[in-house]
Image (cartoon, rainbow, N blue to C red):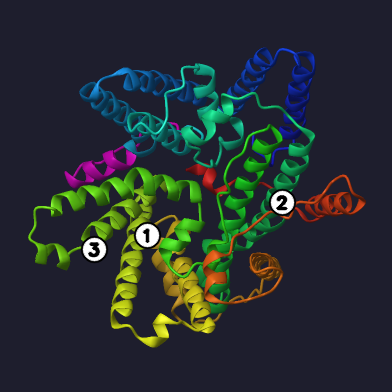
Amino acid sequence: MSFTDFMFYPKTVAVIILLAMVQLLFRRRQETAGVIFKAILLLYSFYTFVYYDYRFALCIAFVIGITYFAALKIESADDRARKIWTRGAVTALVVFLGIFKYFNFFAENISALFGHDWTALSIILPLGISFYIFSAISYVLDVSWGNMHADRNLLNVALFLAFFPKIVCGPIVKGRDFLPQLQEYRRVKWDNVCVGIQIYVFGLFKKMVLADHLARFVDEVYSKPAAYGTATVWFAVFSYMLQLYLDFSGYSDMAIGLFKILGYDVKPNFNLPFVSTTISEFWNRWHISLGDWLTEYLFNPIALSFKRKMAGWNKEKRKKYKMLPTYAAVIITFFVSGVWHGAGWIFVVFGILHGCFSVIQQMYGNWVHKKKWSWAQDKKRWLYVVDILLNFVLIVLIQVIFRAGSLDWAAEIYKQLFTLHVGLEQPYTWSIFAYVLLVIATALAYRKSNGSRLKWDREAMQDVEGYYIIQDLSTVKGLTCFFVLCGLTIIMGYFGETYFVYGQF
């Protein structure tokens, strides 16, 4: 039951009305109202899993059980037992993810290594498994590291992991951010509904009006690139980057909007990623919940481990290789990021390329800083714009591997990009329209961050943040703007067969 399915809306509205009735009936018994409120949300969340496949519900129930009981054991154990329980729980969660998502990939490659054929097993890919497994691991580690206490309320832990707005495409929610909200009495409030529904419609507009129309053009060109001229293939490659952004950020906006309507707050998952000057900055602005997770639970521990091993080196050697822990952690983190997206060599190459180019950019930046060139110490505005454009093109080209589906087909796309040839030419109108809207939105963000002025200086380029344009729905102007956006979404939206790109991960 996707956000774009028609039946999602009457069912969800019915649940929200039911929650409002519970609040009204038990307004003087808040503790009881809170339990019933969360129980309804949990039942609806499990219904969403069952709607796709009852086995998906069994999988999330298994993960909830492991996470809940392991966290309680970890908190009550001594240091030695805590480490054992932590490693056991994390290993169990990783193995659980690996069986469903990576078993056939590893078995096929191991069989090929020994000259055997492998017949792929029919293994289901549970809905949202990559997202809720990472949430579960973060909760277990935070309890083990003393960043939070284990929640003894099974209902809270179950809802934290299975909450329906984030089932398909996340974002990855951390226990220490979300469980305290579940421990409070949260209600459906009119003010939250007004804000949340606007955020939701923003996301729906991105998805149905922009991303889904772009998908038709991108799919056509990627399916037979040789039939199109060089310029159109380039146009499709750039269109895919925008399609992916609008599709994924659109879902994130819808999920955040639903969270808000139900009384819960979740951090934004995207923050103007296309203004980034480096790949590292791009990943700080793109899929922020995954980037934060990888930084905290993978990059930092790996870098710290390398530094500890280097502590026994002599001073001269440590100085010479002082950046080695950072570079090694970057490569490993991006490798895991690539593999997180899927089982296949395209994802391995995708992650390693991001890691290698990120290290190269950091090495180049350190080298330039060491040289103390004046143009690098005090960059002109146009140089920052050049950095943004070059970084964007680099990311777009890496993204070809992500979209192609196989390394052979990615090679075919690259061939069509870098050989001049004639073919069908199609300056797709929806791509132009989407990029114009993106430029306008970015300009508005710059304007807001600089006190209503378009000031393209260094600080503005580094500190600019995206935001939701929230209207006051108690005014005629606010209602007019909101219903115009709703109308445009209905009139211009693509209502053919569609899916969320990140739903497959």
Q: Which tag, 1 or 2, sits closer to the chain's start?
A: 2
Within 10 Å of the Cα at label 3, are there few (<14), some (14-19), or many (20+) other Cα atoms? some
Residue 393 in the image: x percent, y percent? 48, 72
User: On the rendered image, what quadrant is the N terminus found in?
Assistant: top right
Q: Is residue 227 visible?
A: no
Distance of label 1 from label 2 (alpha carbons): 35 Å
Identify the amino acid type marked 1.
Leu
Identify the amino acid type marked 3.
Met
Residue position for label 2: 202
Tag 1 and tag 3, C-beta contact below 8 Å: no
Identify the amino acid type marked 2.
Phe
Work out which residue is located at the far right of the displayed protein and give it.
476
In the rendered image, the vertical position of residue 5 relative to residue 408, given as above or below: above
Q: Quadrant of residue 428?
A: bottom right
Residue nearer the viewer, 84 or 492: 84
| Label drawn at residue 323 | 3
Q: Which tag, 1 or 3, sits closer to the chain's start?
A: 3
Q: Which tag, 2 or 3, sits closer to the chain's start?
A: 2
Q: Residue at x 44, y 55 (%)?
A: 405
Helix, strand or loop at label 2? It is helix
Within 10 Å of the Cα at label 1, are there few (<14), some (14-19), or many (20+) other Cα atoms? some
Residue nearer the viewer, 251 or 101: 251
In this picture, which residue range is highlighted in magenta? 104-125
Residue position for label 1: 407
Residue nearer the viewer, 275 or 447: 447
1 or 2: mark nearer the eye: 2
In the rendered image, the vertical position of residue 172 relative to residue 24, given as above or below: below
Helix, strand or loop at label 3? It is loop
Q: Residue at x 68, y 58 (%)?
A: 210
